[in-house]
Each structure stands twice: as structure tokens, then as C-alpha cells.
Image (cartoon, rainbow, N blue to C red):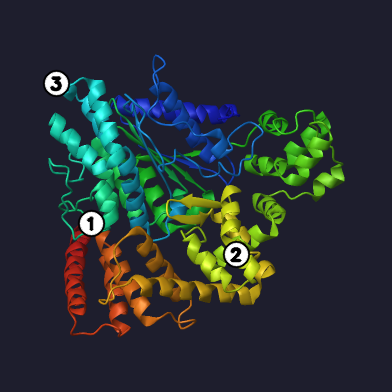
Amino acid sequence: MSELVGSGRVAIVNALVDRVDALCAGRDVSRVVVLEAEAGAGKSRLVRELYERLRQRESTDGAANYWPGLDDRATGAVAGGDPFPSRKVVGPKIDGFLWPANVVPAFVWWDISCETFGTGEAVAVTDRFESWWAAHGTAMWWAWNTRAGNLEQLAQSRDSVIESARSALQESAVEGMGELIQMTGLPTLGLGWALSTSGRVLTAVQTRRDRKQDLIGELVHEADTNSKGQEIATALTRLARRDLSVVVAIEDAHRMGPDLAALLDALAAANSTHPVLVVATAWPEGRTNHVWNDWLIRHQARGTAEVQGLDPLEDSDLETLFHAHAPTTDPSTTAAVVQRWRNPFALELLMTWGVIEANVRANNGALVMSEEDLTDLPEGVVDLLGNRWGSLPKNVRRALALARAGLGVQALGTEPFIRDIISAAGARLVDESDAVSLPLSLQSAAEMRWLRTLDITDALADVLVADVIRDRLNNVIGRSGVAGMRAAVITELCTQINTIRGADNLLDDNDENRIVASWLISLVDAEANTDPADPGALTAAYILNADTFAETYNYTEAIHQTRTALDLGTLNPDRPDALNIRYKLALWMGQWVRTGRRLSLC
């Protein structure tokens, strides 16, 4: 990455590294540090710097790192590079990770963004952790046992066992873990992920997400637990040792809800033998979210969380950022620019805007503009993103507008969507030639970093991007196009559900079906009695959504969704599937009463 500018920023990263060391030493210090500053101030950049500092310490004697570097070309985090791709990046990608040969991790890093909670917070957090565990769980288990001294009992050499684990992991995380257990007889850490000695998965809940279960196992319900967040916190805490620190990076924590609050409650609890540091980013105005504000006030009072503000960069630091883009600019123009564009992200957005880049190229590396011309340029991050939007090809703007409209104008805008659904729905509204190019236009949007690709889904890059697109919907596709896209997406979602649902009105429980179900429900609930969905498809969506909520112990929402499905009247009350659904409803109501009573005693 490019060199971090600002002595105050460097001091914050140094303090975070020292905090990791203090926790490893068993000192009584707060385990949650919140980096609070306006959008674009550089909070995510500090988190990335912490990650890289820990990586540098991981490598000794020229040995390879377990954790990959943050690819400068992928993030744009290079001097004079485009800052847009690196926005919100606070950790390495999970997809495509390969365990390096003969290497075990020296620290643990897990990151999550609160802007990606499209299918419900608890579900999103659990999915993120399960995906992370699939990629890293075996290596984490091995690192823990390495430091616990359990290698001494092994007949095989350390490197040969690690290589066997890596090879098995490439085939299946569960089978890889099972092979290690059989080979070594080492403990499983009690992480809540139940594995038998044959590597098969044991679950204490009904079969869920069969495809994913084959890969990573099931987070098992533990006694006296009513939150997936608590279970994940328990897993991470048990993984931590004084010689194996755990860092949890949470982007945009001010958007969190009760489930993430439960996870943070558990992680923030003092534990001198299990060093876990949470580094969260948040906007000051995010305190209007009462869940976040109440959590922060409570833990600040306890001394388990502290807030670290980011002071504005000095003129010399901003000049460094500016000169990375326009190194030969005269001092008076340089001073004028850095006095107006004080936000680092805004400054770099300005300097990577096509109009400005062309000016610098034409003047041999100098920005040449009159004071009047500079005054006419946009100043804020949102306005600069708007200018960048205007520079996009027309077909890309239209594709992004259709995607934003397809989520519903009332949505946050960063919820995951399926590109094929957007393409098929959009094809109903545009000319045939444009319809053919829609998938390519969405791909171009992803390459330009206006979309984030998330395994089987895509999402708009972040909330600011989503807002910029939403504010321009009427200009791009018109009011009728906005309403028409919403209706077309509902039709496509219902068509997909009706194609794959069985005679019992049930959908298989997998990632894509859960996204389709929650997406359909969000659109129908957003504007009741407008463009009603097919009742049979909607019933199947509500039933699957109810199961998902129940698995994350949100029995209130599970009960509500099940009752809504039954009220649609498409289920034959005498069929076994209807009886089974009513049976589950009764069970959940009992669980709701049980957990409600327990919570009332806390």
C-alpha cells in the first residue's frame, strides 16, 4: 500500500498495534476501539494499515505470510491511484484464498461490513463467519494446536502434517478438519463447530443449507445461547491465545442492530487469557442509531470500549496526497486546492476525476486552473461521486439505475442482488439491443468498482454510491421506469421461485434461494398492495425466510413470517407440509416464550 500520511494517523496505528500486544500480555485494557470520523476521513485506511503492520510482524527470516497482502491493484491503494476501489476494504478477500505451503497464521483477522446486511443482520453475520471459517478454519485450528504444544505427540513432521491439511482443505474444509483430527488426535478447540472423528458434520438443528453444510459444518446451538452473535464471539474468543491474537474489524458499526450488539457485548468482556481486539469504524452522525449509541455509551462507561477521533490532516500531508497526482503543480495552486478539499477521500476523488486527470496530463504533471475555475469544482464527497457518475458510459449508468430501482427505492441500497434477475427484469423495459448488453454493462460497472461482487451476488459499492444513484433514478430511467423495474423484478423473482419450488410449496434451503426469498419479501412489504406477487411464490418465500430467522433465534420474526405465509391461503391445510409448518410455528412460539423469559431475567 502507499505510505500512510499524517503523524497523528501513524500514532493511532502504533497505538492499535500496542493494544494488541497489551492484550496478549494480559493487561486490563479496553478490547474495543472505535475510529469515529466523517465519511472519507480515512478510517478504513487505518484499519488496512493495522492489518499490514501485523502481516509484517508475521513474517520472520524471509518466511512466507499466511495472510495475503491487500493487492494494491485490486484496492487502488497506491500513491496517486484511484481511491474508489479501496473504499470500505478492511481485510483480505475470502474467495479464492489458498493456504500457503508450510505456513500457519501468527494472528487471526476477521472483518465484516455492516453495509452488507441485506438478508437480516444475524443471517449476514453468520454467513460471513461461515464463509471465513470455510477458508481459514483448518489453519486457525492448526495454529492454535501449534501454540498449545500439541505437535510433540505427532509421529509425522510438522511440515508434512501441514501439507496434508492444506491438500485436504482444497477438497473440503470439513473433510480437511476431519482428516487432521484422525491423523493427530488433537482437540477441536470446542469452537461450537461439531465434527466427528470421521469428519462428518454433527448438527443440533434441522438440516440447513445443504450445499454449505457439505463445506463447513454447522454452528451448533449451545445451552443458554439465544444469539448467533454470542456463538461466534465464543468461537473467536476460544481461538485466541496470548500467542495468537484475534482482531475483528467492523466497518460502519454505526449501522449495527441488536444481533451485532450481542456479538460485541461478548467480545468486549474482559478476558486476560484470550486477547481479542475489535477495531470498528463509525460516523459521528451514526449515533442517531439508538442501538449503536446505547451500546457505545454503556461500554464507554464500563471502560470496555473507547472512541478515537481522527484529527484533520495537516496541510503538508494533504499536499503529499495532492502531489502524488499532480507533482509539478505550482505552490499557489497547491495551497488553494488543499485549503478547499480537506477531506482526503474528496481530494483524491477530485484528482482522479477524468476532467482533472486530463488537465494534469496536458500540463506535464501540473494542475493548471484559475482560482475561479477551482471554485466552480464540486467540493463534497457526494458531489464528487456525482461527477464521477456523470463520467460513466450511458449504458453503465442505465444498468446501475435499473439495479438500484430493482432493490426498491426505500431500501438502503447495498443489499445483495442476483445479476441475472436484474438483467432479465431490465430486459422487459429497454430496447432489444440494450437488453442484450445489460449483463455486459453490469460487468463493466463491477470492473469500475461501482458494484461489489460477493460470491453468487452483487451489491452496490456502498451507501454513498447507492444514494448517488437513487437521487438520479428519475433522470436516467424516469418515474415509470423506477416503478416498472420494481414490478419486473417481482415478476422475475416469482418466476424463479415457481420454477424451483416443490409441490409442497417449499424452497430448498441454499444461499441463492434465501436471497431470492428475502428480496421478494422486501419489495412486496415496501409498498403493500402494489404489484402483488404470485401468492404461491410469496408463500414459499415467507416459509424459507421464517426458517432462516428461526435459525438465528429471531423467533418473533419467524412467527410473523410463518403466519403471513399461512394467511395467504395457498397451503392445503390437510397436506403434510402445512401440518409441518404449523408444528414448527408451535415450536417457535414455545422457544420465543422460553428465550423471552430468560432475557427478562438478565
Please rate how many residues cluster around mark 2, counting C-alpha atoms within 10 Å: few if below 14, some from 14 to 19, many from 20.
Answer: some
Location of residue 154 in the rendering, given as x and y in whole percent from the top left corner? 15, 22
Tag 3–tag 1 contact (CB < 8 Å)? no
Q: Which residue is mark 2?
A: 436
Q: CA distance from mark 1 to mark 2?
A: 48 Å
Q: Nearer the viewer, residue 35 or 417?
A: 417
Query: Is residue 64 depicted above or below 342 in this figure?
Result: above
Picture quadrant of residue 104:
top left
Residue 466 shows up from this direction: yes
Q: Is residue 370 above or below residue 420?
A: above
Task: Tell me the quarter of the image containing the C terminus.
Answer: bottom left
Q: How far, Cα to Cα, is label 3 from label 1?
A: 42 Å
Q: Using the image, tell me which numbered label, if any, was put on residue 390.
A: none
Residue 538: image location, x then y, percent: 37, 76
User: Closer to the camera: disc 1 or disc 2?
Assistant: 2
Give, as a three-letter code, the residue at label 2: Val
- List the residue tagged with mark 1: 226
Image coords of residue 324 (percent x, y): 69, 30
Q: Which residue is mark 3?
A: 155
The image position of residue 73, as x and y in percent, is: 57, 36
Q: Left of 88 or right of it: where is 239?
A: left
Amino acid at dot 1: Asn
Q: What residue appears at the point 21 percent right and 28 percent down from the top-left corner?
A: 145
| Helix, strand or loop at mark 2 | helix
Q: Residue 556's image quarter?
A: bottom left
Crowdedness near tag 3: few (<14), some (14–19) or many (≥20) residues, C-alpha within 10 Å: few
Q: Which numbered disc flags the more N-terminal residue, 3 or 2?
A: 3
Q: Is residue 128 left or right of residue 404?
A: left
Mark 1–mark 2 CB contact (< 8 Å)? no
